[in-house]
Image: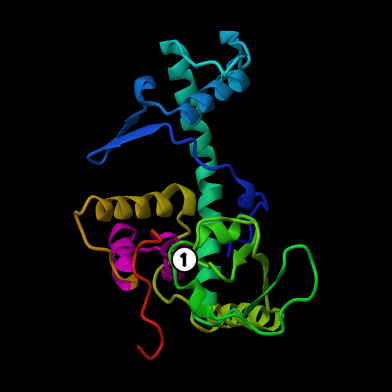
Amino acid sequence: MFPTEWTEGEPITPEPYRLNLGINGITSALPQSMAKPWQKDTVHRLILRHHPEFKRPPTRHGKFGPERLTFTVEEWQAAYQTAQRLDAERLVSRRRFEVVVREIANQIADGILKYALRDARGGTISSTLCSPDLWNTESISPRFYWCQMNRENPFGVAVGGDGFQSIFIERASLDRFLASRVTAQSSKPDRGPKKAYSLEEKLLPYAQTIYEAVERGESEPPTRDEFVSKFRDKFPDVSIPVVRNFVWPTRPKAWNRRAAKGS
């Protein structure tokens, strides 16, 4: 899906620092007075690592645990700006990973990719393929943390522990799926005008404006064709397969999936 951009570091790209405050759709810097202890610890670590000029001492521990963290206005602002910069640098990598994760999950849910489970410690992979229905959920991210799931509690939020098993994709189904992608791309070329718009600089940021408009209640979640149409209005010579294959899969997980076959 990303033959030239994929770095192999996408799955371990750190999560956003989440030092923003959102009110009525407006995002601003989180004030120190409203920060939770874990957010103050994040700021503290950012300063220690990226701002030695403040000469901030390491975490001190008292009789009852770590001492309460406080910051000067300059320290808080510097940490916030650093967090914003790092989040922006990592955003493209995280989005690539999210696109691939959603594609895998959708293909498993549709029964295209087959899978089975194996005890996390080792042993034989189950000879019985698992039900694709267990992937009809918006809560799939825990399964990609350690590539494990719990057959007895498949929709839980935990990422590992007792009862969790490693997820294995059947090789034959993966080969068929990959072959079908190559065939589809070669047999159904985009016959409209094309231009190589930057996925990171143009297409994904525009998609984000659509997502935010839906989140604010200004519009309904578009269908795939409506989504593509919006992009054709904005970028008349964009490649339709690029929008379908690389931008559409980044839509919010809460949007309804297409109906199952036969429904």
Q: Residue at x 41, y 12 (%)?
A: 73
Q: Residue furthest left?
A: 218
Return the residue found at the far front.
Answer: 63
What secondary structure is the magenta-colored segment mainly?
A: helix
Q: Nearer the viewer, residue 8 or 230?
A: 8
Asked if residue 253 can be seen in this view, the reply is: yes
Quadrant the N terminus occupies: bottom right
Residue appearing at x 62%, y 22% in the figure:
49
Is 241 included in the stretch rendered in magenta?
A: yes
Region in magenta: 225-251
23 displayed left or right of 258: left
In the rendered view, does 141 fall on the left or right side of 214? Answer: right
The residue closer to the viewer here, 121 or 191, is 121
- Rendered image quadrant of residue 263: bottom left
Q: Quadrant of residue 34?
A: top left
Q: Is 166 in front, or is 251? A: 166
In the rendered image, residue 42, in percent from the top left (x then y), is placed at: 53, 28
Q: Position of residue 13 (x, y in %)?
A: 60, 45
Q: Is residue 231 magenta?
A: yes
Q: Picture coordinates of residue 3 (x, y %)?
A: 63, 62
Where is residue 131 drawn, in percent x and y?
55, 81
Identity of the residue furthest to the right in this view: 123
Check disc 1 and report the residue beneath it.
242
Residue for point 48% across, 50% down: 200
